Amino acid sequence: MAGVSGLKFVAVVFGVLLAGSSLASDWLLSLNGERTQGSLLRGQVAPGVSVALAGKPVRTTEEGYFAIGFGRDAALAQTLELKKGEERQQVPVILDKREYNIQRVEGVPQRTVDPPPEAVLKRIRAEVAAIKKARASDSDLQAFLSDFQWPLTGRISGVYGSQRVYNGKPGTPHYGVDVARPTGTVVVAPADAVVTLVQDDNYYSGGTLIMDHGYGVSSTMIHLSEVLVKPGQTVKQGEPVAKVGATGRATGPHLDWRLNWYAERLDPVTIVPPMEE
């Protein structure tokens, strides 16, 4: 199947879990990815086997491929629930706990900590609603199975999960990876996708682009100076889609790349190889 050849699956050995049962050969489950908080895992079950995570159904392709994601503070003990006909099995998935960079900043003017006025909040709510809708896309694209690439290379200036505490009040954690490059540097698609959202001037994220890779997996690029594609457009991996900027709430030009599995905010670094210098 296209897009799957580069994906190396690590099998979960059912012989241990299902010793003496024919299910060991019928329910061949594989999982690929870092089993840690913030990660995206991709796997496969035999056709006819349904998958659920924490009681919620997980979509699978006709060949049994699927994706699941775990947020920044996900519980370390997770359970995949498999069902075929009337028979069910539970497969434990144990995540590694991550340590995040937490900075405590005191003496910050309170006006910069308090929320913005209601008029601005109304705008922010509308922008957030559009982003949530785009990330809820549940298309049949199977680009989520491919080997993702960095959308550009450069100095890593911000990491997933980091957080600042201002005057004792925790700020929103950072949910992406920042790559510092000059304004106008070209950003490419990390994998095949369909463009689901383009926003030119978000209050927080400035120029914003969301691309759907299928089965709930999406990429978001923010603080862009220019978006080169339009909603509904199909893009190929490596195709130019935007340019680096410092729009929205940004202190300098950089790309903030974010990865989602539906509403779960994941770490893009978990699905790409180490960045080449």
Image: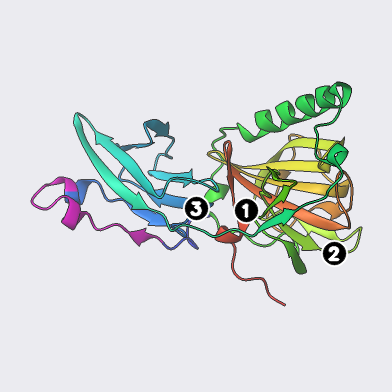
Badge nearest the viewer, 1 or 2: 1
Say which amino acid is labelled 1: Gly
4 on left or right of 51: right
Provide residue 32's location: percent of width, then percent of height. 43, 58
Badge nearest the viewer, 2 or 3: 3
Whether residue 13 appears in magenta in the rendering, the answer is yes
| Residue at mark 1 to residue at mark 2: CA–CA distance | 21 Å
* Residue 113 numbered mark, or none: none
Residues rendered magenta in the picture: 9-23
Secondary structure under tag 3 reads loop
Q: Residue at x 50, y 63 (%)?
A: 6
Q: Which residue is drawn at 24% across and 46% down?
A: 27
Which residue, given by chain and number where applicable, does mark 3 sit on?
37
Which residue, given by chain and number where applicable, does mark 2 sit on?
181
Which residue, given by chain and number where applicable, does mark 1 sit on?
161
Secondary structure under tag 1 reads loop
Say which amino acid is labelled 2: Arg
